Amino acid sequence: MNENSVTPVAARMAGDLGVDINHLNGSGPGGRVTKADVISAEAGPLTWLKQMIAVRRFEEAAGQGYNRAHIGGFLHLGIGEEACIVGSCAAMQAEDYLFCTYRSHGHALARGTDPKLVMAELYGRQAGTSAGRGGSMHIFDAERRFMGGYGIVGGNIPLAAGLALAVKRRGEEAAVLCQFGDGATNTGNFSETLNMASLWNLPIVFMISNNGFGMGTRLDRHASHTDLSQRGEPYDIEGSQVDGMDVEKVKEAVGAALFTARSQSRPVILEAITYRFRGHSAADPEQYRSKDEVEEWKKRDPIKLYAASLMERDLLSQQQLEGIELSAQDQVDQAVEFALHSPEPEAHTLQDNVYVDTANTAGALETIR
Amino acid sequence: MSSGFTEMRTRDALNRALREELANDPSVIVMGEDIGAFGGAFAVTKGLLDEFGPERIMDTPISENSMMGIGIGAAIGGLKPVTEMMTINFALLGLDQVINSAAHARYMFGGQTQVPWTLRMPQGAGHQLGPTHSHSWEAMYAHVPGLLVAVPATPSDAYGMLKTAIREPNPVVFIEQESLYGRSGPVPDQETLVPFGQARIAREGSDITLWGCSRGVEWALQAAELLEAEGVSAEVIDPRTLRPLDVETVLQSVAKTNLLLTVEEGWPRFGVGAEIIAQVTRHAFDDLDGPPMRITAADVPMPYAKNLEQLAQPSAELVAERALELVQRRR
């Protein structure tokens, strides 16, 4: 292996991730090792397990922070949906764009955002991903092309299609992954956007994480046809379902969907069947479902299932699993510690970033109350 | 030659601005209902499809909510989309995207993104279209921090301000006025950008300040003619933009005239006139010789019957009458 034939970005990333470049077969010109090679070398079963556990621990810590009133507003946890979160992000290439909902702390972590910064956002700190202006529902990481969590159900769908239009017009080799829940499929935004995405051949994957409830209304009470993957039929959009509790299956299905979107410049629908183990938000008495039902689904806990599967395949030992658990807990403890002691935004910054400051924005805001 | 002016209708001035910006910058696209093959419901986009092709001049389905979102998403993705809503009435269907996405994205994501998006649409009553098709919504858009709001009142400003809007990295709500599309005026031959936040003194005067918004400028100017016959000298101010808002020019005018009357096409309560009056009352209370007042539409959904519609709309006569009352009361 020629040590010179590595892109600088790939070399830096390999250092960060602890990937040994000397054992990689480069896919770039002349066998040059690229960023994508490093990512695919690093990403594997253990990484996905680690990420799912990291998301679970993060969400548990966020729930505790909420109960202690360190975190305000609404808090929507992804506990139970980790395979959808991690599997989908693992299938993305660095060039792809991601749009999420108000339940997207885990997506940011899976996309590589520092958990300290995500936690700081929940704590309303200046160091947070959105400088404490967005909160839990509005995480964003431009550098990782994580184009936002959005608080309005279905509101992210046309935005993602618009970004796909920009990608297409610029001739970028990328696709957009737009994630939302079963509830969002009943919005006008969904139907309208499916029509335009198909009409204009946009490179976008509409991923429905169907957790069985639009807030507290069960699927069969909110959807006239419960196979949501078929919602694209009148718009000539291919759709399929995947087991949303199996991280490898999700990764494979999202990967295939993104490939179609990217290579054929076509929209695709993917419905992942999943379940959230916690309430819709932290303030949910959960009177719309039984404890038995939740317990039944917990038998298909995506983390337990995957750990068992890896052990069965001799890819994971009990000792390794304990190490992963400890390290995830340690990482989240550090994130909470960081957030707790991180400064709040300063009063004089209250009206910062309402606009990009230009000659035309002077006097755009009232400054006197 | 290049320092000359050409007489042009507002719709043609807007068309010229779009054509120039499309030619200047490949990231500019225009989207909307019937803007391409049809040429635009008000012919503002006439000829653009032939010149720039369907990838840049995009006819959309009748899906106002999502076409707003797609325009905004494309702007977040680095294009400079101009979304045409056929009229401001239909934009109500897409208001969530304008406010929750376009206006708030930059702030709520900590300054990590920007929305270089222009939403242009006509407003106004006077064509017997009844309650659903006669709205004026400048006050509602101007209420929202994060939006810039332009209300051009002349062909020249329509041209120069649309160019400014398209080049802005911020979302601009560009409100045109249906009745003004056919009005002609001199437009500079040379490429010109009109900056935001600088009010225009449309007519100088010394006895009373008439602050008019959008078509209100026309009514104010016509009223000034009527007042001149009565020996009253009215100054007419056109704000050009509501966000940013040029308060200083109004204050300077009121310092001279000591009387203020605002003219707008929207409803009276919580309208743009109310805001101007609040600003003047706070900053120039001692300059005022009488109560600042406003001329607006009547406080009623716009009726269909011709006589009732006329009754519900502002008019130059109404402006002149109220202005005269204010001046005479001072005397």
Image (cartoon, coloured by chain):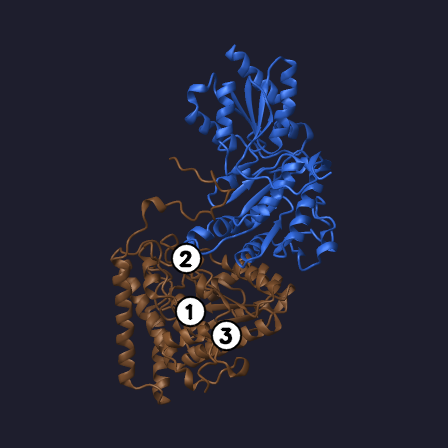
Marks 1 and 2, how far apart at CA: 15 Å
Q: Which chain is brown?
A: A
- The amino acid type found where label 3 is placed reads Val
Identify the amino acid type marked 2.
Answer: His
The percent position of residue A100, horizontal first and vertical second, equals 46, 63
Image vertical order of residue B195 relative to residue B46, above or below: above
Mark 1 vs mark 3, CA separation in Å: 15 Å
> In the figure, residue B10 lies in which quadrant?
top right
Q: Secondary structure at mark 2?
A: loop
Query: Which residue is disc 2 drawn over?
Result: A138
Q: Nearer the viewer, residue A211 or A305?
A: A305
- Tell me whether circle 3 and circle 2 mark residues in contact (CB < 8 Å): no
Comparing labels 1 and 2, the label whose residue is closer to the camera:
1
Q: Which residue is tagged 1? A: A111
User: What secondary structure is marked by label 1?
Assistant: helix
Q: Along the polypeptide, which appears first: circle 3 or circle 2?
A: 2
**Could you tell me the amino acid type at mark 1?**
Arg
Q: Chain of mark 3?
A: A
The chain holding disc 2 is: A
Q: Tell me the subunit letter for badge 1.
A: A
Can residue B108 be seen in the rendering of this structure?
yes
Q: Is residue B128 visible?
A: no
**Mark on residue A254?**
3
| Residue at 40% across, 62% down | A103
Extreme-front residue of the structure: A4
Apparent colour of chain B: blue
Label 3 packing within 10 angstroms: few (<14), some (14-19), many (20+): many
First along the sequence among labels 1 and 3: 1
Please state the horizontal and vertical placement of residue A69, each as a whole percent of the image: 26, 55
Q: Name the residue: 46% across, 19% down.
A: B288
Q: Are marks 1 and 3 on the same chain?
A: yes
